[in-house]
Image (tube, grey):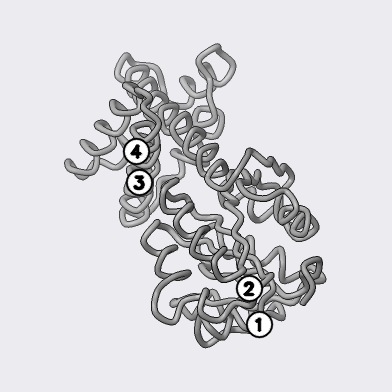
Amino acid sequence: MTTSEISRVGFVGLGNIGKPMAERIAISPFALTVFDHVPEPMRDLQALGAHAANSLGDLAERSDLVAIVVQTTEQVRSVVLGEGGLLGSMRPGSIIAIHSTMSLSAIKEIGARCAARGVDVLDAAVSGGDVGARAGKLTFMIGGDDAVLERCRTLFGHMAANIFLLGDLGAGQAGKLANNLLYNAGVVAAVESMRLAVAAGIPENVAVSLLSVSTGTNFTIANWNRLMGERQAPEDRERIAALRHKDVALAIGMAKELGEEVALGQAVLDRIDWAIAHSRPGEAGA
């Protein structure tokens, strides 16, 4: 493989975001290999022509670029650096694109370990949710070398409508965590505002219509019926609340690393934690 050639793509993590991202690649000219501990999404991708790897090592050997879309920092570290992980089987000149949301210190550590083996890492955080992933309209927030990004632009264009190079490795996560802090603050504010309006006797549907065209509107209000009106199963709501905790906690951790105060962020995290502790995930926007 020369440093300009990317024709074989691997995907690790076929969940709510990773699976529709991989589906976009399955219908592209790129050869796709997938791996997940849950067999069902792998079978679905196989039906679209993807190869199902039997291990991370197998996937690494079949890929010029591996995209990682797992949930936590610990999972990313295990996928890349753990026993039987990607790094042990990836060739010099290959690329790891990390789409997961994780800490700045961890992404830099992983990048350094990979660089020592000649493997490039792009910090490629995403925004747009499952709807954006299915439509190929995600926003990619990139941290890393611009020459490496240029090798990936055609591939990324099958998944993203907006691609921002924000700086060195870690800048993508910084952009994502800043966005997540703003988004989750808006979620909590929207939930409390709606609860207040309904408590005062305004029907929920009327309150949504009012706030959607008023100065206080935000993404959550504008998408209320999709995000909140169609209530999810209890286990899904608990999972979403836990993800909100993770995202805000990571943003607060970044602020501490940078010596910045985020008092509102801490208040949002406290409210999410209260909702989880009292088994009321709806108060966290779930």
Give the Cα distance between marks 4 and 1.
Answer: 36 Å
Residue type at mark 1 is: Arg
Please give left or right for residue 1 compared with residue 166 in the image: right
* Residue toward you, 75 or 3: 3
Residue pointed to by mark 4: 253
Give the Cα distance between marks 2 and 1.
Answer: 7 Å
Q: Residues within 10 Å of mark 4 (few under 14, many from 20)?
A: some
Residue 99 disc label: none
Closer mark to the observer between disc 4 and disc 2: 4
Give the Cα distance between marks 3 and 2.
Answer: 26 Å
* Residue toward you, 45 or 127: 127
Residue type at mark 4 is: Gly
**Residue 123 location (% of width, % of height):** 57, 52
**Residue 112 location (% of width, % of height):** 51, 59
Closer mark to the observer between disc 3 and disc 1: 1
Residue 246 disc label: 3
Residue pointed to by mark 2: 10
Tell whether label 1 touches label 2 (CB within 8 Å).
yes
**Residue 141 location (% of width, % of height):** 62, 43
Residue at figure coordinates x 64%, y 66% from the top left: 95
Q: In this view, does 223 lie above or below 189?
A: below
Please give left or right for residue 239 compared with residue 223 in the image: left
Tell whether label 1 touches label 4 (CB within 8 Å).
no
Q: Residues within 10 Å of mark 2 (few under 14, many from 20)?
A: many
Looking at this rendering, what residue extends furthest in the left direction?
278
Residue 114 quadrant: bottom right
Residue 117 quadrant: bottom right
Q: Residues within 10 Å of mark 1 (few under 14, many from 20)?
A: many
Residue at figure coordinates x 26%, y 31% from the top left: 271
Tell whether label 2 touches label 3 (CB within 8 Å).
no
Give the Cα distance between marks 3 and 1.
Answer: 32 Å
Residue at figure coordinates x 72%, y 71% from the top left: 26
